[in-house]
Image (cartoon, rainbow, N blue to C red):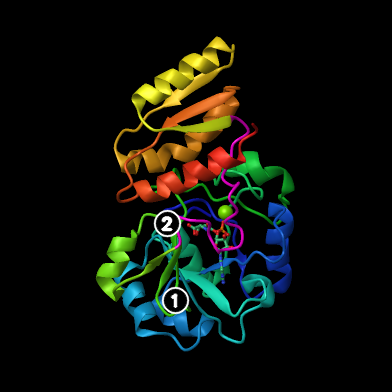
């Protein structure tokens, strides 16, 4: 299903066999937890327990929107969804189709990004077809085309089970905007992440991705690669929102065009730029070098 961040591979979050299929279709290790998508903040208490004021304040401030909160899990939540952890990730997506699906279904939908494990997240329905189409069963699975995702990067993940809220994955909801609601947060998002599945090498296309510090550095790298008869291109930054929205489609496009190397000029580390840099560094670590 489409969301404002990336396409999700959804399954009824209380149905053990439906949740199990997410892992087989994605090829994802079973201990990696899933985010439960809900259409109403009232459902916070169905999935979480001992909810803090911070959780309710953040839901009020940012939902529907690209923010996932980790809260203590309700005892009824399946182990397969939480990876056996005592916390559960909850998010209300800001997309009319996703909200309608959740509303009509009437319960939580567990959904990771709809890509094979380790690959770039899909931001268009055709990416989903290309990535996991072969693993789907046409007699019972559907891909819902909601057009291109408006944000283009996965949601911000904030852990509310720690003493101080901790950002595990940067996204469109910035650390500063979270701090404006709940006070100081811990930022592990700039170092190695603690969320399972947030491996260093992730979000990686097949081609080599190099992060250049500026345009001159990019030109130098381009010259070097082309002298070595490589197919190389430079991706430069326009405005940050457009860059975020189109980044994954461009990483995929680089592979489709058979590039050896994609050189990306690093964007400024402000606003969604923090999340773009995070994903670029993972793509760079994961590429075949
Ligand atoms: O924008 C998004 O968040 C998209 C759309 C579909 O909503 N979903 C998404 O899901 O990116 P996924 O599974 O690709 O990434 C979720 C990350 C994973 O790294 C997972 O390990 C972590 O969140 N996560 C989920 N629940 C967790 C929990 N209880 N404790 C720690 N990490 C958790
Ligand atoms: Mg993912």
Q: Is residue 271 magenta-colored?
A: no
For the point 44% across and 55% down, which residue is it? 190
Nearer-N-terminus badge (1/2): 1
In the picture shown, does residue 126 fall above or below 110? Answer: above
Of residues 165 and 95, which is closer to you in this image? 165
According to the picture, the residue beneath numbered tag 1 turns out to be 160
Counting from the top left corner in percent of width and height, residue 146 is at 46, 48
Where is residue 98? Give x, y as percent: 47, 60
Please name the residue that numbered disc 2 is placed on.
170
Residue 30 percent coordinates (x, y): 72, 64
Residue at disc 2, CB closer than 8 Å to ligand 1: no
SS under mark 1? loop
**Which region is colored magenta?**
188-207
Taking depth in this image into account, of 54 and 144 the one nearest to the observer is: 54
Is residue 77 left or right of 281 when viewed as pictured?
right
Q: Quadrant of the C terminus?
A: top right
Q: Looking at the image, can residue 149 be seen?
A: no
Q: Residue at x 65, y 64 (%)?
A: 32
In the picture, the disc for residue 63 is none
């Amino acid at each position: 299903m489409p969301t404002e961040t990336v396409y999700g591979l959804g399954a009824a979050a209380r149905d053990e066999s439906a949740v199990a299929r997410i892992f087989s279709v994605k090829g994802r290790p079973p201990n990696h937890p899933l985010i439960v998508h809900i259409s109403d903040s009232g459902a916070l208490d169905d999935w979480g327990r001992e909810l803090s004021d911070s959780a309710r304040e953040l839901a009020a401030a940012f939902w529907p929107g690209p923010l996932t909160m980790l809260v203590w899990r309700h005892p009824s939540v399946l182990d397969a969804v939480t990876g056996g952890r005592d916390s559960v990730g909850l998010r209300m997506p800001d997309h009319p189709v996703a909200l309608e699906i959740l509303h009509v279904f009437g319960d939580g939908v567990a959904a990771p990004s709809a890509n094979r494990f380790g690959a770039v997240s899909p931001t268009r329905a055709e990416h989903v077809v290309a990535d996991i189409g072969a693993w789907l069963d046409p007699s019972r699975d559907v891909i819902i085309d909601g057009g291109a995702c408006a944000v283009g990067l996965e949601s911000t993940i904030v852990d509310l089970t720690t003493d101080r809220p901790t950002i595990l994955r940067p996204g469109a909801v910035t650390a500063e905007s979270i701090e404006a609601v709940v006070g100081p947060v811990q930022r592990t998002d700039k170092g190695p992440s603690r969320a399972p599945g947030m491996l260093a090498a992730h979000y990686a296309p097949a081609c080599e991705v190099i992060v250049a510090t500026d345009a001159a550095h990019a030109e130098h790298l381009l010259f070097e690669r082309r002298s070595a008869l490589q197919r190389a291109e430079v991706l430069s930054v326009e405005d940050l929102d457009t860059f975020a929205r189109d980044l994954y489609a461009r990483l995929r496009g680089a592979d489709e065009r058979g590039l050896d190397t994609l050189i990306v000029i690093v964007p400024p580390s402000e606003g969604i730029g923090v999340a773009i840099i995070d994903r670029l560094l993972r793509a760079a670590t994961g590429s075949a070098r």
